[in-house]
Image (tube, rainbow, N blue to C red):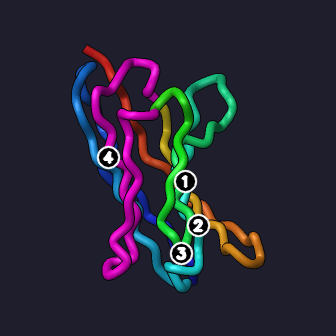
């Protein structure tokens, strides 16, 4: 059974940092591109960061470039999103997404809430 389980969300003050984790199970982790999306209230889901398998290259939305970093630990089948210099506009539910790089089949996690507020 495929599972993506996010953790690490919470309340943080502007300028602070959080690290989100997404633990994967039930599929061959290194055959999948890994992505983080977010969705703020009343807005569409937005692609935040992508890690391309197997090369490890990364892409970021302009709004988070130089502040967020996506990475993986293949030994733990886990993808991370390190978020620094957080802003109130980063407040959203963050979702982990895995896409099989040959078939395009995708899976979603349940999401984790990030709130940036003083």
What is the secondary structure assignment of the residue under circle 1?
Answer: strand
Q: Which residue is drawn at 38% across and 40% down?
A: 68
Spot occupied by residue 60 in the image (x, y as percentages of width and height): 52, 42
Front residue of 115/63: it is 63
Q: Residue at x 37, y 77 (%)?
A: 74
Q: Residue at x 24, y 35 (%)?
A: 17
Q: Which residue is drawn at 66% across and 26% down?
A: 43
Disc 2/disc 3 C-alpha distance (Å): 8 Å
- Callout 1 crowding tier (Cα within 10 Å): few <14, some 14–19, many ≥20: many
Disc 3/disc 4 C-alpha distance (Å): 20 Å
In which quadrant is the C terminus drawn?
A: top left
Residue bearing mark 4: 82
Spot occupied by residue 86 in the image (x, y as percentages of width and height): 32, 26
Residue bearing mark 1: 50
Q: Which of pointers 4 and 2 lies earlier in the amino acid sequence?
A: 2
Q: Which of pointers 2 and 3 lies earlier in the amino acid sequence?
A: 2
Residue 70 belongs to the span the image colors magenta: yes
CB within 8 Å, label 3 to label 4: no
Disc 4/disc 1 C-alpha distance (Å): 13 Å
Residue 31 belongs to the span the image colors magenta: no
Residue 107 picture quarter: bottom right
Residue bearing mark 2: 33
Q: Which of pointers 3 and 4 lies earlier in the amino acid sequence?
A: 3
Magenta residues, as a range?
65-91
Direction from residue 69 to residue 118 in the image, left or right: left
- Above or below, 42 against 113 in this view is above
């Amino acid at each position: 059974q495929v599972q993506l389980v996010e953790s690490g969300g919470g309340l943080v003050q502007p300028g602070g940092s959080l690290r989100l984790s997404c633990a994967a199970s039930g599929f061959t982790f290194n055959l999948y591109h890994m992505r983080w999306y977010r969705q703020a209230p009343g807005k569409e889901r937005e692609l935040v960061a992508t890690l391309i398998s197997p090369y490890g290259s990364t892409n970021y939305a302009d709004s988070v470039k130089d502040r967020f970093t996506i990475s993986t630990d293949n030994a733990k089948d886990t993808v991370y999103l390190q978020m620094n210099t957080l802003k109130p506009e980063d407040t959203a539910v963050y979702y982990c997404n895995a896409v099989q790089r040959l078939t395009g089949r995708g899976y979603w996690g349940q999401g984790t809430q990030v709130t940036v507020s003083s």
